[in-house]
Image (cartoon, coloured by chain):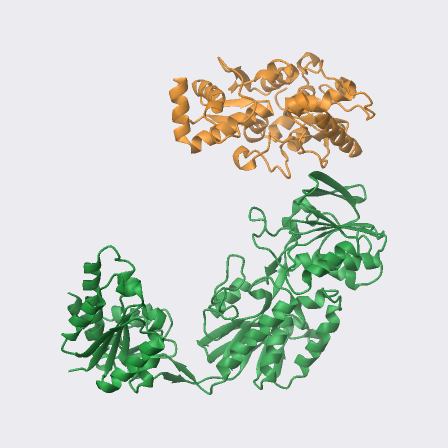
Chain colours: A green, B orange
Amino acid sequence: MSRIGVFVCHCGHNIAGTVDVKAVVEQLQRNGDVVFAIDYKYMCSDPGQQLIRESIEKYQLDGVVVAACSPAMHETTFRRTVSAAGLNGFRCESANIREQVSWVHQQDKEAATQKAIEITASIVEKVKGNEILEPLVLPLTHRTLVIGGGIAGMQAALDIAEAGYPVILVERHDHLGGRMAELSGSYLNFRAAPDLLEKKIQQVLSHPNIQTLRNAEVIGLSGYVGNFRVQVKQNPEAEETPVMPLDELQPLTFTFDVGAIVVATGWQPYDRARLPEYGGVEIPDVVDGLTFEKMLREGGVLRRPSDGKIACEVVFVQCAGSRDPEHGVSYCSKVCCMYVAKQAMMYKERVPDGQAYVFYIDIRSAGKNYDEYVQRAMTDYGVLYLRGKVSRVFREGDQTIVWGSDTLTGRAVEIAADLVVLATPMLPSRGSAELGQLLHISTDGYGFFNEAHPKLRPVETLTAGIYLAGVAQGPKDIPETVSQASGAAAKVLQLFSKDEMTASPLVASVIEELCAACGACVKVCPYGARQIHPIWNYATVNAALCQGCGACVVACPNKASQVRNWRVEQVMGMVDRLL
Amino acid sequence: MAIPYFPGCTLSTKASGYDRSGRAVAQALGLEFQELNEWQCCGATFPLSAENAMALVAPTRLLRQAQDAGGQVTTLCAICFHVLRRTQHFLQGHPDVLERINWFTEEPYLGNVRVTHFLELLRNELTWESLRAKVRRPLQGLRVAPYYGCLLLRPPSEIQLDDPDDPHILHECLEALGCEVITFPYQSECCGSYLVVNKPKVPQQLAQDILTSAQRHGAQALVTACPLCQYNLDYPQKSVSGWTLKLLPVLYFTQLMAVALGLPSEDWGMENHTVDPRPLFEPYLTTVGQGRTGGDR
């Protein structure tokens, strides 16, 4: 006979308003395996947990059932509570009489009470068979792979390396710095981006804990959190080996073991050919924001690309291709309002007599000192902001005509411009979707990587041990990118703070004598956690990969496959109790 | 081949030259227009109100006539085409509205008539190559700018004739006639439409912008498929005081076709234009039978 205690929670009126909790207690007290049953207003409160702890001691309980809310809510809480009283946490289960009973059966209190009694009794049946388990201990490689050598990847790599752990930084191009290296200056302080970057690049290249692989791409990944194995292909650099013709140089392939991965693959500009109404790539004096950055970086007076005349009238078109679900991308690219203000001011510094116009839908300048910065463009620099969309850009003679609307005055506007700058949206880098498939992390419809939770887990992915930094996850500016990169680094360091990893022991196991090595379980396992042992010829489980889903249990014709604490006889006992 | 044809009110009155040239051209190409037995106004605008059944009665009745005439109807007027095609598109997606209209008219329309614009017939069924082969007076060197306006192309999801931001159908037609075709930025801007009735200054200003731009791009004539566009662009050139722009003829595409196909000048229908386009064609009249000719001669 077991010595099980049943604790029935009122959850204020949430449960007790519908379920007769006293009746549940009375019924459960009649169960031969239950030595103690009691109800209380809030079991999850401190006095409620105290009640559980004291009862375990007083009645020498060897199992606990808390009839309360869903296990998703408080299973961890109550397992911690019983552990504190010296009982193994896996000898405690939640019986869900709130989400599955009181909330859905408010109209029929009698039936609700009966259902609560039956559910609780079936969980008592389960606890009787629960094994005493300890968390699994897994090895952990304290090395990180960072994919992408832009500001996001470099910041994450530096933070991790500074904490004393080795980092492998893989960059597709032959230089570090990413898109930030293409910018003229940053907004707020106009500091030249290359100067800001140069220091970071030097820090990365000279750091003893960082190994940088340029011209390199990740081509393979296996393993799991703490124990990834990655394959990296590096294309040889021609200038380093001038004696050999390039086509005879073979790419090198490396294999590394790493414990964590930071994905910082950045972005690429929107294809202007998709904007034929704005001149697309046809009109030489229509450029995108990144091209204008290059023109600013070259210094001197700004000139028209077509004929080199000074650009006296410059029109900036915000949201060119973004916030346009019909023809472009539906999202806001977030950085354009700010960089357009910066570009317009830098233009006015170069061509003081020139006029800059900005067509905008609305100004999104949320951020510390951001709105003040845009106001400066309007008041100190005389940039003319026109609220409205541009309808068409076309060539007339040597000028570029911009048609738009000013919705504040309600007029159609026509500007004969020397230069038109399209603030096109950021798109995820080329190959993002393919990389996502390789790493088993999901992407959204545009190819941005999905975070594990939009509010509370913004730097993690749903694959444990893989973290996100920078625009790879969604459009963001430099300070935000740096913050997220440091956040990703902190998550890696949190993982590395232990020598070994612990994992849930509620995984599948195989009764070897029953296994016929048919391989049915290998086929159905969605996590690749099973294989047939090459020598002993029975199925084995990689406990680190197994998530305890139970697909193998259903597939196994011999009932050789079992999930811990969900063994067949336990489940059948629960069913018997219910029927 | 007989094609059921709906001329519409304007082509029977103000734009009779469009009708005359259109019928003559169709005949020359072996496509005989067969006027619907009985017809009335299409309504002239596609209703924009949510409760539109009553306003759709007129075009539905025309579709019903076309149903009797063999299940298809072609038009020249861009406005009639616009109304009929949108009505057809709408009724296909709203059988309940069709049922109410049928109940009201007591002449059941089954909902399957194919509405085409003559340009579409030329492109899809005749093909530009065979048009080119039938040209007897190639209009080589004549610089014409197609002017599409609004209703021939928009809304593209319902009209499905051509890309409203980058249309080609008139270009292709005029190229087949041997013209030098000019693309100008105002080619699918609005002419002002019915504002000519109560705010004539608006279409006059727009006409000035459109004609100025076309001339700046070197056009000798503007070519359209819409009688209202033709009117709005043509009449102000002589009736607005202080009009300083050089006169620019505004033609229907069928009129240019009539010239190029070698038809006699009675079939051109150019007598009532404010700016007489006929002098444009004097250089080409001597070349009958000497230009590129088709296999039907």
Quarter the C terminus of chain A occupies: bottom left
Q: From where the camera sits, is residue B109 visible? A: no
The image quadrant that residue B198 belongs to is top right
Query: Residue A332 location in percent, x, y?
Result: 59, 55
Query: Residue A166 location in percent, x, y?
Result: 57, 84
Query: Residue A65 location in percent, x, y?
Result: 25, 75
- Give left or right: position of A88 versus A241: left
- Give left or right: position of B263 versus B94: right
Query: Residue A36 location in percent, x, y?
Result: 20, 79
Q: Is residue A413 above or below residue A37?
A: above
Q: How many marks?
A: 0
The image quadrant that residue B297 belongs to is top right
- Give left or right: position of A56 versus B89: left
- Give left or right: position of B90 versus A118: right
Residue toward you, A131 or A176: A131
Residue positioned 25% across, 84% down in the render: A56
Quarter the N terminus of chain A occupies: bottom left
